[in-house]
Amino acid sequence: MEKIDLINVLMTDILDNILLIEEKALTSGREKRPTINETHIIDRIGRRGEIRMSDISAETGITTASMTVAADKLEAKGLITRARDGTDRRVVKLSLTRKGQAVYRLHSRFHKNMINDFMSDLSGEQESALLSALEKLRVYLVNFNA
């Protein structure tokens, strides 16, 4: 297998497995949990405290209509609140409820634990190489989507 094909297989498998692990973690328990996509929206709101709905749409590539549907579902589940901007009524801002903040903290803890477990066996040199490669990949993807 060529190097480029191997990298493609590894990256695809890594993403698929992270999503599967997340899905299992999110669907455990009896209570109806947010979907992976809803959880990622909650994560974006949680990192900012409050965010314009249009900013989430732009950053994630979710259409405004799809974002509205997702916000409706998250609001119905009691995870977010919506508010019109005081100066521009066209702007809708999203923020987390206490329940949404709890989901955000659980999701953040899940990722921190997964990364800590993975990185615990890496040498300093391997860790530096991984961080450098991931940063280059992030910059490439951000620029690709711009």
Image (tube, rainbow, N blue to C red):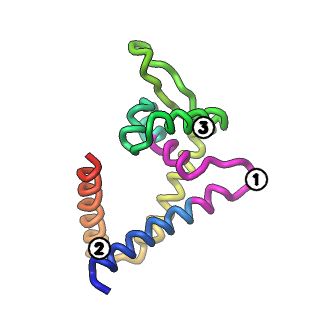
Q: Examine the rendering and report whether any part of residue 98 can be seen.
A: no
The magenta stretch is 23-44
What residue is shown with label 2? 124
- At 44% from the left and 39% from the top, the residue drawn is 63
| Spatial separation of the CA atoms under disc 3 and disc 2 | 41 Å
Of 56 and 114, the residue lying toward us: 56
Q: Is residue 42 magenta?
A: yes
Image x and y of residue 114, in percent? 49, 65
- Res 51 quadrant in image: top left
Dot 1: element: loop
- At 29% from the left and 49% from the top, the residue drawn is 145
In the image: residue 24, left or right of residue 92: right
The answer to whether 36 is drawn above or below residue 72 in the figure is below
Q: Mark 1: which amino acid?
A: Arg
The answer to whether 17 is drawn above or below residue 56 in the figure is below
- Of helix, strand and loop, which mostly describes the magenta segment? helix
The answer to whether 115 is drawn above or below residue 141 in the figure is below
In the image: residue 111, left or right of residue 11: right
What residue is shown with label 3? 74
In the image: residue 143, left or right of residue 59: left
Label 1 CA crowd tier, 10 Å (few <14, some 14–19, many 20+): few
Q: Mark 3: which amino acid?
A: Leu
What residue is shown with label 1? 30
Dot 3: element: helix
Q: Going from the N terminus, do you reach mark 1 or mark 3 first?
A: 1
Dot 2: element: helix
Label 2 CA crowd tier, 10 Å (few <14, some 14–19, many 20+): few
| Spatial separation of the CA atoms under disc 1 and disc 3 | 18 Å
Q: Examine the rendering and report whether any part of residue 100 can be seen.
A: yes
